[in-house]
Image: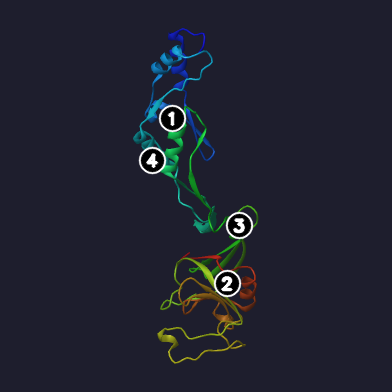
Amino acid sequence: MGGLTPAAALAAVKVAARSPLVVTVEDVRLSMAPQRLGVKEYVEEAVARARRAKPGASIPLHVTVRGTDVRAWVAKLAANRDREVRDARVVLSGAHPRVVPERDGYVIRREATVAAIVDALLANRRGPVKVVANLERPSVGSAFFTSAVVIRRGTNKLVYYRDKGDGLEPMRTFTVATGQSSYPTPLGSFEIVQMWRDPWWYPPPSPWAQGLKPIPPGPGNPLGTRWMGLSVPAVGIHGTPDAASLGYSASHGCIRMAIPSAEWLFGNVKVGTPVFIISA
């Protein structure tokens, strides 16, 4: 401020002291007037001391900051910017599966961010001050979902969807058997949780299976040569030696396929593949 009149020096310091503080949150830059953060600058005192100082001396500008104002601003920022981590998932849009992408979780560490802002303001720095936050990565990304299955219970069709680079698209449709009226195939969103080659058949805890014994792999096995168990008790997709039942509501809740079709599907799904069963 050397060479300025007291009035000019006072005006210049006030302009500099009230320049905005820049705060960065992720890829966004926010500008805040220090006064909104409870900053008070003792400009007159600094200029008075400068007038008494030797030429070339550095005179600090003392400021105070109301921590409650900074905390309130950071709390409002966190309310707008915090978000929970989200894994990618598949949902139905109409009757067609669609991948909803994953999302990083982001949580602002409030007290650490308040401290960083207060430190900058007390030192008359204008930033940028980077918000202190915890970043949480999702455990399941969109790339996991390369396929999906939609079972149309009303028409006894199984539609296999494949990611062809622009979302999930129908690739093959199979005629299947679904549950009879007394043992209906459940409706809803599921996933494949078991995949067995040449499975044993074990009688489920249901009245229709009382007294029956396990059946080993072989031509008479009611599960055929492949079993894809769903995330619902005692229900899965499997082959069947009873090809005449396909196209009808004939099972005890499972989804039956022709044995070659079940083997093909088994080779094109994995544990975690979404399976939607709809009434259409």
Instruction: Tell us which disc is closer to us: 4 or 2.
Output: 4
User: Label 3 vs label 2: CA separation?
Assistant: 29 Å
* First-in-chain label (3 vs 4): 4
Residue topped by disc 4: 75
Whole-percent x, y for residue 74 in the image: 41, 38
Q: Residues within 10 Å of mark 4 (few under 14, many from 20)?
A: some
> Looking at the image, which is closer to me, 77 or 232?
77
| Colour setup of the view | rainbow
* First-in-chain label (3 vs 1): 1
Circle 3: residue type: Ala
Circle 1: residue type: Leu
Residue topped by disc 2: 175
Q: Is residue 196 left or right of residue 41?
A: right
Residue topped by disc 3: 143
Q: Quadrant of residue 6?
A: top left
Is residue 237 depicted above or below 242 in this figure?
Answer: above
Circle 2: residue type: Thr
Circle 4: residue type: Ala
Residue topped by disc 1: 122
Instruction: Tell us which disc is closer to us: 3 or 4.
Output: 4
> Looking at the image, which is closer to me, 110 or 138?
110
Q: Quadrant of residue 222?
A: bottom right
User: Label 2 vs label 1: CA separation?
Assistant: 73 Å
Q: Is residue 231 left or right of residue 63?
A: right
